[in-house]
Amino acid sequence: MSENQTCPFCIPNPSEKVIENSLAYAKWDTHPVTEGHLLIIPKRHFADYFEAIAEEKGELWGLVDQGKALVDQKFKPDGYNVGINVGASAGQTIFHLHIHLISRRKGDMENPRGGVRHVIPSKGSY
């Protein structure tokens, strides 16, 4: 079985696609960090954001903006974290590029200061 046949993002169920353009699609995360956690995924299979061509990057970030509008309307969050894990050392577990759009709410954690800096907890506070 090829990598693309085993990749959970390569053959998505059409009903999972929340929004889509010619090179990418967005779906709700099946293990959401918060209500409204959206994944933006290129249709072409590759693991690393830095392998994306310029057109793919444009389409991906376009869906991030469209996804934010959708999440704003549906869930009314107070803020967002936007993140990409590149490589196993950075925590990537599905080796098909995907961008996390994570909605945040006031009070969802005691001290959110530092945001994505907390990927290494002891280094997040400043």
Image (cartoon, grey):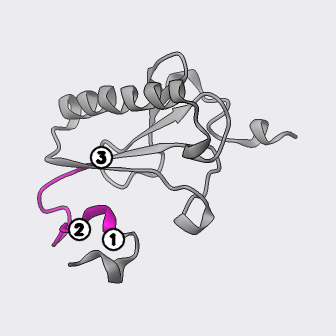
Amino acid type for the residue under numbered disc 3: Glu
Name the residue at the right extreme.
1
Which of the image's four quarters has the C terminus?
A: bottom left
Residue 48: x, y in percent? 60, 47
Q: Secondary structure at mark 3?
A: loop
Which of the image's four quarters has the N terminus?
A: top right
- Determine contact: label 2, label 1, CB under 8 Å: yes
Label of residue 35 in the image: 3
**Residue 31 or residue 114, whichever sits in front:** 114
Q: Which secondary structure is most common in the magenta stretch?
A: loop
The residue that mark 1 highlights is 118
Residue found 75% across the figure and 42% down from its top? 6
Gap in angstroms between the C-alphas marked 2 and 1: 6 Å
Gap in angstroms between the C-alphas marked 3 and 1: 20 Å
Q: Can residue 70 be found in the magenta stretch?
A: no
Q: Secondary structure at mark 2?
A: loop
Residue 33 falls left or right of residue 84:
left
Q: Earlier in the sequence, mark 3 or mark 2?
A: 3
Amino acid type for the residue under numbered disc 1: His
Q: Which residues are magenta?
A: 103-117
